[in-house]
Image (cartoon, rainbow, N blue to C red):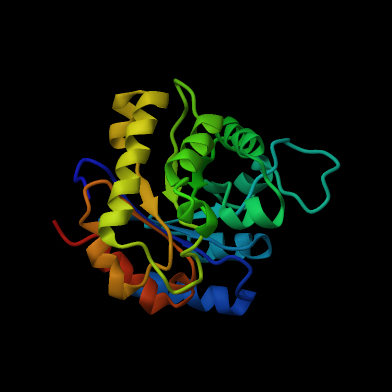
């Protein structure tokens, strides 16, 4: 991890938890989180939980984000959510292009780009997700896929954002990229960002790893020079596991 960049630890709850469970999680998290954590901590609950979680996390140590955003500010888009609605619910971040959205809802690279642009337009920080499937990795197409996904979204003067590399073959599988493999991909991503948005922005933008991150493997991943934090799925549902990863990823200076 490069000390010049902010460490970001994000928990993506996906379609889990009810209101009472979410509120209990937030109370436990705040009670056990360091007074001045060295990481920026974000929770991405499902849409029905956003207001409850934002209220429970009325604390500068933890931010709240939406799991998706529609490119339009309003309109006849049943089942979707807009940037202004996310802001109104207490969000400051939003995921764009998570692999499950790309797969389950056939989101194209171009649609992901429009969502990221909408996030910036409405004052949200997009966390843009990229990653390859098992078949693409086995075919030797990892860098080709990532390059295509990046090129569709980014241009010069792109606003503030974070990037999350989530190898689709690792999500929910219990498998994780080795630290060396993850670092190789993160280094590639940072170089391509340098080409697309400029070397200065690429130097400071956080690139997170997301692929079956657990307390057991977090320490080995976070020490890599281009891994700046984690987008965590299953382990973020348990507040103690989530706290353990935060402590490993952001040791006291």
Give how far across and how far down residue 194 sits, in percent: 34, 28
User: Is 139 drawn above or below residue 115 in the view shown?
Assistant: below
Extreme top residue here? Answer: 156
Question: Residue 28 in the image: x percent, y percent?
Answer: 42, 77
Q: Quadrant of the C terminus?
A: bottom left
Which of the two residues, 76 or 31, is positioned nearer the viewer here? Answer: 76
Q: Is residue 228 left or right of residue 164?
A: left
In the image shown, does 127 or 99 lie closer to the viewer?
A: 99
Left or right of 240 in this view: 58: right
Residue in the picture at 42% in, 68% down: 212
Left or right, residue 76 beside residue 211:
right
Instruction: Tell me how many marks there are.
Output: 0
Which x, y percent locates residue 241?
Answer: 37, 76
**In which image quadrant can residue 251 be found?**
bottom left
Residue 85 in the image, given as x and y percentages of width and height? 68, 46
Asked if residue 209 is positioned above or below residue 161 in the image, the reply reads below
From the viewer's perspective, tell me whether residue 76 is left or right of residue 144.
Answer: right
Of 187 and 121, nearer the camera is 187
Residue found 79% across the figure and 54% down from its top: 79
Q: Can see residue 36?
A: no
């Amino acid at each position: 991890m490069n000390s010049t960049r902010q460490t970001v630890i994000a928990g993506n709850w996906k379609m889990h938890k009810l209101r009472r469970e979410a509120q209990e999680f937030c109370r436990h998290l705040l009670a056990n989180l360091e007074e001045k954590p060295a990481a920026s901590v974000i929770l991405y609950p499902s849409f029905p939980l956003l207001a409850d979680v934002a209220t429970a996390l009325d604390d500068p140590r933890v931010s709240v984000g939406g799991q998706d955003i529609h490119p339009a500010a309003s309109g006849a888009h049943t089942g979707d959510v807009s940037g202004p609605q996310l802001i109104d619910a207490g969000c400051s971040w939003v995921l764009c292009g998570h692999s499950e959205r790309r797969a389950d809802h056939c989101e194209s690279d171009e649609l992901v780009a429009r969502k990221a642009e909408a996030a910036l337009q409405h004052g949200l920080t997009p966390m843009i997700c990229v990653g390859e499937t098992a078949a693409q990795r086995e075919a030797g197409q990892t860098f080709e896929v990532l390059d295509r996904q990046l090129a569709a979204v980014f241009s010069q003067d792109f606003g503030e954002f974070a990037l999350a590399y989530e190898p689709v073959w690792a999500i929910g599988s219990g498998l994780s990229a080795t630290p060396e493999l993850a670092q190789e991909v993160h280094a590639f991503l940072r170089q391509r960002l340098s080409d697309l948005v400029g070397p200065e922005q690429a130097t400071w933008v956080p690139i997170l790893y997301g692929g079956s991150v657990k307390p057991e493997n977090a320490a080995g991943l976070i020490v890599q020079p281009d891994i700046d934090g984690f987008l965590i799925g299953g382990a973020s549902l348990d507040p103690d596991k989530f706290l353990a990863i935060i402590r490993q990823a952001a040791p006291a200076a």
